[in-house]
Image (cartoon, rainbow, N blue to C red):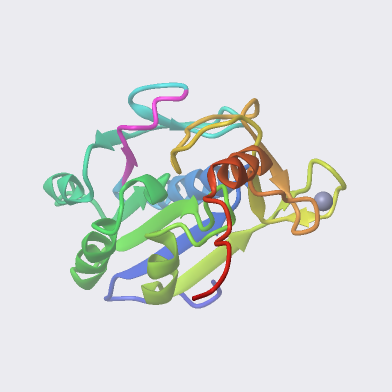
Amino acid sequence: MHHLPHDTGWIEVITGCMFSGKTEELIRRLNRARYAKQRVVIFKPSIDDRYSADSVVSHSKQKLQAISVKVAKDITDHVDDYDVIGIDEAQFLGEGVVPVAERLADSGKRVIVAGLDQDFLGRPFHPIPHLMAVAEYVTKNLAICMQCGNPADRSQRLIRRDATVVVGGTESYEARCRRCFTPQPIEQERLFETAPPPAASAP
Ligand code: ZN
């Protein structure tokens, strides 16, 4: 970002898989704004209580005070006094975060959203792909594949769970490259087990 806009708001998206440094990058941008005496606030979904209830903490233990919100529209209750709005783990806030981010940017605020762009099956994880489309700036961070060392953009789930949303750290996920990523083989096996037998013959 060499040429920052002025007299207008905008949206920045920081995305990528787990362990790609999204939260570190969000915290870095917010701290830089704070040094410039801009008024900064950060939100996170209340579902994510990994390390602390009221701060955003990256895997590398960087920390920033945060406001937890249940739904995206709660963000609009707390932003009047701020210039820069950070939203972490936005994939857990659902599609509602898109109109909220757009409204804040329209009203002149700088909105920085961090979140996963793919779910544990490698599918687009909304609302992040939608936000990437309407954002002025998109940064896709890559991690390092924990199997082979290639650049990685997928989050491999290592435990057996059915829900798309499983919040966890190092113990439940690995960053994987395209080649090493295996979308939940256990679940696929079970799907095959329960599939109906093939029809005997076509009519
Ligand atoms: Zn790999």
- Residue at screen point 32% across, 39% down: 45
The answer to if 45 sits in the magenta stretch is: yes
Which residues are the magenta region? 41-50
- Residue at screen point 49% across, 76% down: 203
The answer to if 133 sits in the magenta stretch is: no
Above or below: residue 196 compared with residue 51: below
Q: At which x and y percent is residue 48? A: 39, 31
Q: At which x and y percent is residue 176? A: 73, 48
Quadrant of image for the N terminus? bottom right
Q: At which x and y percent is residue 115? A: 47, 51
Give the residue furthest to the top: 52
Q: At which x and y percent is residue 112? A: 40, 57
- Residue at screen point 42% across, 60% down: 128
Q: Is 106 displayed left or right of 127 in the figure?
A: left
- Residue at screen point 59% across, 62% down: 140
Q: Is 91 displayed left or right of 101 in the figure?
A: right
